[in-house]
Amino acid sequence: MNKKIHIYTDGSSKGNPGPGGYGVFIETFLGHYYNRKIISEGYRYTTNNRMELLSVIVGLEKIENKKQNIIVFTDSKYIVNTVQNKWIDKWKKDNFHKKKNVDLWKKFINLFDKHFVVFFWIKSHNHHYINDYCDRLSVEASKKENLKIDYVYEREKKIR
C-alpha cells in the first residue's frame, strides 16, 4: 500500500523585506493510518518569496523515505509556475544566472528530485482552512521574539 503525502505550505513577510515566517502542515495517509506534522519558524529579515520557498523545502525535508508520492499545496505562483513551466530546468542549466534565492532553489532541487512531487495552487485567503491555518502559522512565527537569521539574504543585502 502506497503512502499519500500532502504538504500544505505558506510563507509571509511583513514589509517584504522584513520579519517573515513560514507555516507547514503535513498529512500522511497509509490505509487507515493518518499522521500530521505542523512546523513553523520566523526570521528577522527576509522576503515573502524566500519564506514561501523555504516552507516547501522544510516540508520536503520532513519526508524521510525517498521516492514518495507527494502533493504540495501552495498559494505561491512563484513556486508553482517555476516548477510547472519548467523554468527551474532552464535556471539550472544557466547556473541560476541573475536569479534570486539561488541558495533555496538549489536545496529545493535536491529534495524535489528525491520524490514524485506534484504542485497544486490554492488561491490565498480564499477560505481553504488548511491554507489559512498555514498563513496564520507563518504570520505568528514572524512575530516571535528571537527570530532566526536568514544569513544568505542578510549577507546579500549587507544587513547587520
Image: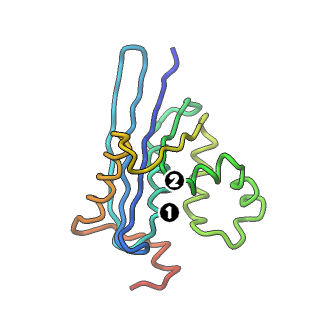
- Identify residue type, mark 1: Asn
Residue 41 in picture, x, y percent from top left = 33, 57
158 lies left or right of 12:
right
Query: Residue at position x 64%, y 54% from top?
Result: 82
Q: How far apart, in angstroms, are the residues tagged by discs 1 and 2?
A: 8 Å
Residue name at image x 34 percent, y 28 percent: 35
Left or right relative to 78: residue 94? right
Q: Nearer the viewer, residue 110 or 29?
A: 29
Q: Do the CB atoms of the residues marked 1 and 2 lie less than 8 Å apart?
A: yes
- Residue 138 vs residue 59: left or right? left
Q: Secondary structure at mark 2?
A: loop
Q: Residue at x 38, y 74 (%)?
A: 15
Whether 35 is drawn above or below 112: the answer is: above
Q: Amino acid at mark 2?
A: Ser
Tell me residue 32's x, y (percent): 37, 14
Tell me if mark 2 has few (under 14), some (14-19) or many (20+) residues whose alpha carbon lies within 10 angstroms of its own.
Answer: many
- The furthest residue to the left: 145
Seen from the viewer's position, the closer of residues 61 and 91 is 91
Residue that carries the numbered disc 1 in the rendered image: 49
- Is residue 98 placed above or below 66 in the rendered structure? below
- Left or right of 79 in this view: 50: left
Spot occupied by residue 115 in the image (x, y as percentages of width and height): 59, 36
Give percent across and percent down for residue 53. 50, 56
> Of label 1 and label 2, which has the lower sequence position?
1
For disc 2, the marked residue is 76
